[in-house]
Structure formats: structure tokens, C-alpha cells
């Protein structure tokens, strides 16, 4: 009897342990999310990373890829093949770059990335992304298989400079509201919004220099009767020779399928009259401050049309009554 | 009567427009205005874009550290882990003839850390194919939209498509549509889809 119980128990355990294979879940976590290194040629440094497997046991590979700005919205392009004088090495006895290793579920792997900058490295910025990549599960025979893998990245911005000098060469390339209606009046273009409409604002900074810059500042809104409001722009990196649309909107906003509705800020509430928006951007202590302004007109168009219709209707009814 | 209505309408409209027009002229005369301008430095020299140091971007201490050690490291959100979860990691259809209407069976669910700004990219490493090289067209759609989109192909040198650019608190559903012709040979077909999540720089 005990033998039967034992065999039932063991079989149940075996079934429980093996039945989950097809419904695998991949889940990885990596920190820190961004590392910025300013380094002199001829020096090296190390940075600690922590990779955690939150899903089923996985085979993972760590890779370094070159990174470049893709658009003004902070998206990037990753390059598998690249030439760089900077050398990378994982300082670990168990794992190395581009070699797969096993990571148990609910376990973490810490590793140190050594960044070595040779003496003759040209002084400019170099951008990379460290990728932790899971291996896709094997395909099932006789079926149509879509195998998925996840790649989780963390960016690495390296500035090579001998004496700490950096180039700060910025420009505000766009500061504008995106209106639904644009009216041309006496040679002026008026951005017209309906009251209670959302007012999207776009602010893009162009970095013409060879080093990353960190614009910060504020956007202020001034309206009729001394109405005013300020929005803080927290420091955001703009990579060398690229542009970036700054963002004020909080991370709580709902996800948007790319490329819909890119904007720096959305003004919402009841507006009425002429409003002026101004942006002031600095790049750190003693750096140039850039200014830009734009304006827009908000008018209760729907309410105005409704009033006219009611007015005309009243006249029409009164005329009819008078005739009677 | 009509004349009176016209006069009242005209007066109301005039007042309405007057109230709506910006009052910057009044604002300038207001004692509340305080214009803060630094003293003009007539002898000051205009800095070249290359005259700045990391002291401007970071701090004096950071600059001193850089001079003494030869490097300076700063990390963003060291305590915030950035994570991605995908479930399941394998989608299988045993009957190829059912593929034409199998959208609901071919759905991945992705959850990304909502604590950090990030982008989610998607690329197909190679087309959905069997050992003989017969391929099946594949497209994808997000649960939030009805539109289906073609998949970029890494073998053809396509760039990964950007799917989302903002953090999400809810899982994202990505469905795949297959378009096998009626004459498609049965057998084992497979492809690899890479979901790449990168936090904002």
C-alpha cells in the first residue's frame, strides 16, 4: 500500500514539475537604467550591474552594442557591428560577454563591466547599450511556432576628455503649440483652440556639440488677468549631434503606440483669451540660457456657435409671433 | 424690439472680446511686476561652446573628483530596477489550416516596469519558415488598436519597429496574424521575435 502511495506521490510531483514547460514566462530585471561616465584617455573604470530573473529558469547572454539617437523622441538605434577604441570586459569568474549562461528563477547575477579607454582615444562622446538577452524556447515539432525572446537594455554614455572640457552648443529648434485650427489674419498666424480642448506643447532642443548636454528650466504660461502657471523641465540628456523633444509629462500617462501624440506638455482645463507660453532653458551653472516664446488664442467656439444659433432661432420665432 | 436685441448683442460681444484680449499693457504698469536683470558686464567675454567643463554640467565636487581620479561615474535611478516580462515565450499552432483565424490564440502579453521612461522595440529575426524554406507572412497588432502592422525583418537589414514610448501599468497584448495560402505545406514552421526594452537615456 505504501509503495502505491509513494509511486502516486512521485508521479504527481513529476507531472507538476514538468507540465509548465510550454507556458513559459520570461522575465528579467536590470539595474541601473543609465550610466554616465566621464573619463580621461588612458584610464579605466568598472561599473556594477545587477540582473535578476523573475520568470522561469533562463539562458541569458550579456552583450554590448553601439547606440545612436534615432529620432527626437528619445528612441535609439542599436548597432551589432561597430568600431570603437573603447574596450569592454566583464569582471566575473562565471560569465563573460557574448557567452550564454544559466540563470535560475528568482535569482540575481551581479557583474562588473570594465570600461577601458586607450591613451589615443579621440576626445568626444561614445554611446553604448548593455543588453541582457534571453534565449527563445525550442520549437515544437509539426507545429507553427512563434518563439519569443526578450532583450533588456541599459544605456552607457561615455565622454572622453583629457581636462574635463565639454562642448555646450545648444539651440531650441522648436517651441510651438499644436493647434487644431490655424487662422491667418493680417499676415499673422493665430493658433486657435476651443475652450476645454487639450493644448499640446512641443519643445525640442538641438545639440550641435560633440558632448551630451542636459537642458533644464521651465515653461511658463501667462494668460488674461495675470493668470500664470509654471512647469518645471527636469534635466534630460540630449546626445551629441542630435535633437530631443523634452518631456514634462509624468510617467503615469497611459502608453501610446508610437508615433502618436508626441508632446512635451499637455495643457488642460478651461482657457479663454490670448495666452503666451515662454520657455527658458539652461544647461548648468554659467552656461548660456535659451529663450523661446509662442502664443495661442482660446475661444469657446462651440458655445459661440450655439449662442448664435439660439439668437437666430429667437429672432425667427419672434418674427413668426409678430406676424400672427 | 429687433433693434434693441441687436444693440444688446453688439454690446455683449464687445465686452466679451475686451475681456478676452490679453492685458499685457496693464500688467506692465502694475506694481507687481519685478524685472530681474543681472548687471550688464560690458567687459565680459562671450564664452565659446568649448570653454565649459563638466563643472558646469555636474558640480565643482564632481569636477575635482574627475581631475583626481581620472574618471567620474554617475548612475540614474540606481535603486529602480527596469524589468520586462513576457508570457508565454512560445506560441504554437498545431494545425496550419486554422492559422487564418487564429488571432486570439497567438497573443503575447508583455509587462514593463512602469517606474521608468522607456521604449519597446520589436523585430523578427527571420521569416516564419520551414526547413524547406517555405515561408508564411506574419503581421502583428496591439490590443489597443485594430490596425495590423508588418513585422520588420532583421535578415533584410530592417530596423526594429518602435511599439511604445511611454510606461504602462497594464500588460500589453500583442497578437500575431498568419496568412498561409491554402496550398501551404504542413510541417514545422518557426520564427524568433525579439522584444527589446530600453529605458530612456
Image (spheres, helix red, strand yellow):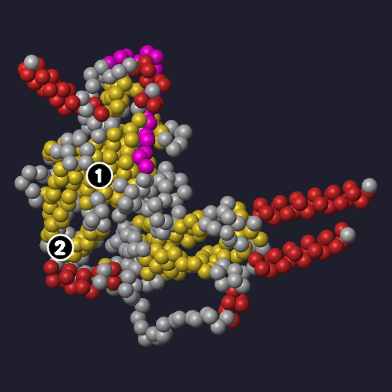
Q: Residue at 35% x, 27% y: name it.
A: B106
Write down the quadrant of residue A259 in the picture: top left
Q: Residue at 84% x, 49% y: name it.
A: A316
Disc 1 from disc 2: Cα separation: 29 Å
Question: In this orientation, which residue lies closer to the viewer: A248 or B140?
Answer: A248
**Residue A76 seen in this snapshot:** no
- Magenta-highlighted residues: B170-187
Residue B126 point in image, percent of width and height: 28, 30
Residue A276 point in image, percent of width and height: 54, 66
Furthest toward the right, the residue is: A324
Q: Identify the subunit bearing mark 2.
A: A
Q: Residue at 16% x, 22% y: name it.
A: A12
**Does A33 lie within the magenta span?**
no
Q: Which mark is residue A152?
A: 1
Which type of secondary structure does the marked residue at label 1 adopt?
strand
Mark 1 crowd level (few <14, some 14–19, many ≥20, 10 Å Cα): many
Question: In this orientation, which residue lies closer to the viewer: A233 or B72?
Answer: A233
Callouts 1 and 2 on one subunit:
yes
Q: Identify the subunit bearing mark 1.
A: A
Which type of secondary structure does the marked residue at label 2 adopt?
loop
Residue B39 point in image, percent of width and height: 41, 85
Disc 2: which residue: A41
**Does B185 lie within the magenta span?**
yes
Amino acid at each position: 500500500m505504501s509503495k502505491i502511495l509513494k509511486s502516486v506521490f512521485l508521479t504527481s510531483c513529476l507531472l507538476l514539475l514538468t507540465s509548465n514547460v510550454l507556458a513559459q514566462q520570461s522575465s528579467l530585471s536590470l539595474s541601473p537604467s543609465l550610466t554616465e561616465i566621464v573619463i580621461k584617455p588612458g584610464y579605466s573604470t568598472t561599473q556594477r550591474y545587477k540582473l535578476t530573473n523573475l520568470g522561469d529558469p533562463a539562458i541569458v547572454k550579456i552583450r554590448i552594442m553601439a547606440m545612436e539617437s534615432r529620432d527626437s523622441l528619445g528612441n535609439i538605434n542599436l548597432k551589432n557591428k561597430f568600431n570603437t577604441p573603447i574596450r569592454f570586459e566583464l569582471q566575473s569568474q562565471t560569465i563573460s560577454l557574448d557567452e550564454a549562461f544559466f540563470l535560475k528563477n528568482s535569482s540575481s547575477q551581479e557583474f562588473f563591466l570594465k570600461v577601458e579607454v586607450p591613451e589615443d582615444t579621440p576626445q568626444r562622446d561614445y554611446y553604448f547599450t548593455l543588453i541582457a538577452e534571453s534565449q527563445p524556447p525550442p520549437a515544437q515539432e509539426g507545429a507553427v511556432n512563434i518563439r519569443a525572446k526578450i532583450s533588456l537594455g541599459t544605456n552607457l554614455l561615455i565622454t572622453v576628455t583629457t581636462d574635463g572640457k565639454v562642448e555646450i552648443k545648444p539651440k531650441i529648434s522648436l517651441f510651438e503649440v499644436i493647434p487644431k485650427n490655424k487662422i491667418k489674419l493680417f499676415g499673422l498666424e493665430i493658433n486657435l483652440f476651443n475652450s476645454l480642448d487639450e493644448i499640446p506643447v512641443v519643445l525640442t532642443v538641438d545639440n550641435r556639440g560633440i558632448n551630451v548636454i542636459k537642458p533644464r528650466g521651465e515653461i511658463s504660461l501667462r494668460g488674461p488677468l495675470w493668470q500664470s502657471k509654471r512647469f518645471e523641465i527636469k534635466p534630460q540628456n540630449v546626445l551629441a549631434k542630435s535633437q530631443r523633444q523634452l518631456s514634462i509629462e509624468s510617467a503615469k500617462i497611459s502608453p501610446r503606440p508610437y508615433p502618436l501624440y508626441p508632446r512635451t506638455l499637455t495643457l488642460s482645463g478651461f482657457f479663454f483669451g490670448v495666452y503666451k507660453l515662454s520657455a527658458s532653458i539652461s544647461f548648468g551653472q554659467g552656461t548660456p540660457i535659451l529663450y523661446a516664446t509662442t502664443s495661442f488664442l482660446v475661444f469657446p467656439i462651440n458655445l459661440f456657435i450655439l449662442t448664435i444659433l439660439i439668437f437666430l432661432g429667437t429672432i425667427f420665432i419672434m418674427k413668426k409671433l409678430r406676424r400672427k | 424690439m429687433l433693434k434693441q436685441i441687436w444693440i444688446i448683442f453688439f454690446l455683449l460681444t464687445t465686452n466679451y472680446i475686451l475681456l478676452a484680449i490679453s492685458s499685457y499693457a496693464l500688467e506692465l504698469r502694475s506694481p507687481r511686476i519685478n524685472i530681474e536683470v543681472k548687471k550688464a558686464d560690458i567687459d565680459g567675454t562671450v564664452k565659446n561652446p568649448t570653454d565649459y567643463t563638466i563643472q558646469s554640467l555636474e558640480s565643482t565636487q564632481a569636477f575635482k573628483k574627475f581631475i583626481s581620479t581620472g574618471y567620474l561615474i554617475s548612475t540614474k535611478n540606481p535603486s529602480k530596477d527596469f524589468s520586462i516580462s513576457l508570457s508565454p515565450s512560445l506560441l504554437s499552432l498545431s494545425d496550419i489550416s486554422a492559422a487564418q483565424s487564429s488571432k486570439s490564440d497567438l497573443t503575447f502579453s508583455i509587462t514593463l516596469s512602469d517606474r521608468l521612461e522607456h521604449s519597446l522595440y520589436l523585430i523578427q529575426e527571420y521569416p516564419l519558415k520551414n526547413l524547406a524554406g517555405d515561408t508564411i507572412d506574419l503581421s502583428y497588432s496591439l490590443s489597443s488598436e485594430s490596425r495590423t502592422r508588418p513585422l520588420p525583418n532583421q535578415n533584410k537589414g530592417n530596423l526594429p519597429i518602435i511599439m511604445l514610448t511611454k510606461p504602462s501599468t497594464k500588460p500589453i497584448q500583442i497578437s500575431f496574424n498568419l496568412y498561409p495560402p491554402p496550398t501551404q505545406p504542413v510541417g514545422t514552421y518557426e520564427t524568433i521575435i525579439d522584444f527589446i526594452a530600453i529605458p530612456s537615456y
